Amino acid sequence: MPGTSCKNCPLRKRSMFLPFTEEELAFMETFKTGELKVDPRTTILLEGSNSPQLYTVLDGMGTRYTTLENGKRQVINFLFPGDFAGLQAGIMGEMKHSVEASTHMTLCVFRRDDLWEVFRRYPERAYDLTWIGAVEEHFLGETIASLGQRDATQRIAWALVRIYERLKAAGLEKDGFVPLPFRQQDLADALGLSLVHTNKTLKALRDIGLAQWSEGQLELLKVEDLASLAMIDLERPQARPLM
Amino acid sequence: MPGTSCKNCPLRKRSMFLPFTEEELAFMETFKTGELKVDPRTTILLEGSNSPQLYTVLDGMGTRYTTLENGKRQVINFLFPGDFAGLQAGIMGEMKHSVEASTHMTLCVFRRDDLWEVFRRYPERAYDLTWIGAVEEHFLGETIASLGQRDATQRIAWALVRIYERLKAAGLEKDGFVPLPFRQQDLADALGLSLVHTNKTLKALRDIGLAQWSEGQLELLKVEDLASLAMIDLERPQARPLM
DNA sequence: CGGAGTTTTGACTTCGATCAACGAAAGTGG
DNA sequence: CCACTTTCGTTGATCGAAGTCAAAACTCCG
């Protein structure tokens, strides 16, 4: 198999992911058909297409988004190392959103046709797939609550805290900084805010010393304050399966 | 088993749901442990709780919602006949939102502990569970796009069309009307709008003869116009599994 | 009849969108 | 190496969609 062996997968070491048994590990080696490396701005999955492939993000970050008829873009969520993409197309037949790389990315590639094999022969792994779906569903629900009920400042605070937590759990935090290689426009499109207002709100958070985000690096200076501003109850990060 | 036998399940007849094999039917009979009937306003699942039960809506309607710390409520989505509830708690350990009945409801009850059995012994049904999750995930993504990118009129039009389609597919349409036993406040909380503005927007749609909703009955007078107003491409309703 | 819940309407306010312009950085090509 | 373009972040001025406040009209029910 080209690329990283699952045995040496750097993500497995992170405590945010549930451990593999030897048997699962062996199976994943066969399930994985290769590795995909893409440049920034590459479209990995296209809305409406019928991708024969499923992916796990090994390295790098991206966005899932849809484009409305009037040209507006909604970023559904961000794609971080460990995230799984393509299940919708795998199950439902076609992608309901696009996936684009924001940085250089490395992805583990699986064959969609093998999905059914997983359900038939590896119920544990099938259960994990459903788990991943459930976690995703929960997060989307929280996003809906943010867009529906939080004002601009709260939304940004919410997003920054959630992103920071997620990246820290993925082992990417260093000296209080976490890499966040997106544009302000991406965050704006994720939160349903205009670019201008997103910029001003970020400046406000910077001015009161709560959070800084520049040159692709995010620093949260007062996580507690940000969390209470965003009305987040900091949930103990729960370990989840890795695909 | 108390209540309706799966064999006579009225939902099975609807073409929106994929057919059962004889074997699956037999299994579902054993999986189903009973029936729950509740009055309007009853909380069926409570956020944060660890429900030992999973439900399929046989009859009636409800809401899934979360409440923020400031007391604001976000309706994540509405619960219609055929919908499955409780999977999140079943998989992740605790409910991330509450479920409340809006009308009298009848629900099929399953034991959460049997879930793993399903994955181990009935991979087809496990696959269907994942399918249901994927459909739900897709819908939540579309909701996010609505809250993020559509204005009040478009949001309401979007919601009315989606609801109408769903209920019609469930076989509840009659003479152009569909039952919609929610309060305007529920729709407002689902779309992130104030009650007052929701009311005024509904009136506007009524005045231009696009849609009427009163006394729990919804009528869409010009579906095409509503759909194009909402920037919806009417997707061919896809049959989906029933649990 | 009184009271609670819901829908409706009008008056006023505000948050965030839009418009517009500028600066910095990075890439491109002659 | 320097004009030129493109992309992204920043800031100020103005406007409008939707929120908030308040109160009336209709239920439905005990």
Image (cartoon, coloured by chain):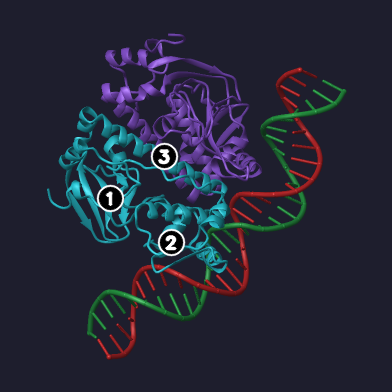
Chain colours: A cyan, B purple, C green, D red
* Residue marked by disc 1: A11
Marks 1/2 same chain = yes
The earlier-in-sequence mark between 1 and 2 is 1
Where is residue A77? Give x, y as percent.
40, 50
Q: Amino acid at mark 2?
A: Gln
- Quarter holding the N terminus of chain B is top left
Disc 1: host chain? A
Q: Nearer the viewer, mark 3 or mark 2?
A: 3
Whether A208 is drawn above or below A133: the answer is below
Between the residue at mark 3 and the residue at mark 1, the CA separation in whole angstroms equals 22 Å
Say which residue appears at 52% left-offset and 40% top-offset.
B157
Query: Does the rendering let one see residue B221?
Result: no
Name which of mark 3 and mark 2 comes first in the sequence: 3
**Mark 2 chain:** A
Badge number at residue A137: 3
Q: Quadrant of the C terminus of chain B?
A: top left
Count of numbered tags: 3
Q: Name the one closer to the observer, C15 or A85.
A: A85
Circle 3: residue type: Glu
Where residue B179 appears, as percent x and y from the top left, is 54, 25
Mark 3 residue element: helix
Disc 1 packing (10 Å; few <14; some 14–19; many ≥20) = some
* Upstream in sequence: badge 3 or badge 1: 1
The image shows residue A141 at horizontal and vertical percentages of 47, 41
The answer to whether residue B204 shows anywhere in this view is yes
Q: Which residue is mark 2?
A: A185
- At 57% across and 52% down in the image, what residue appears? A228
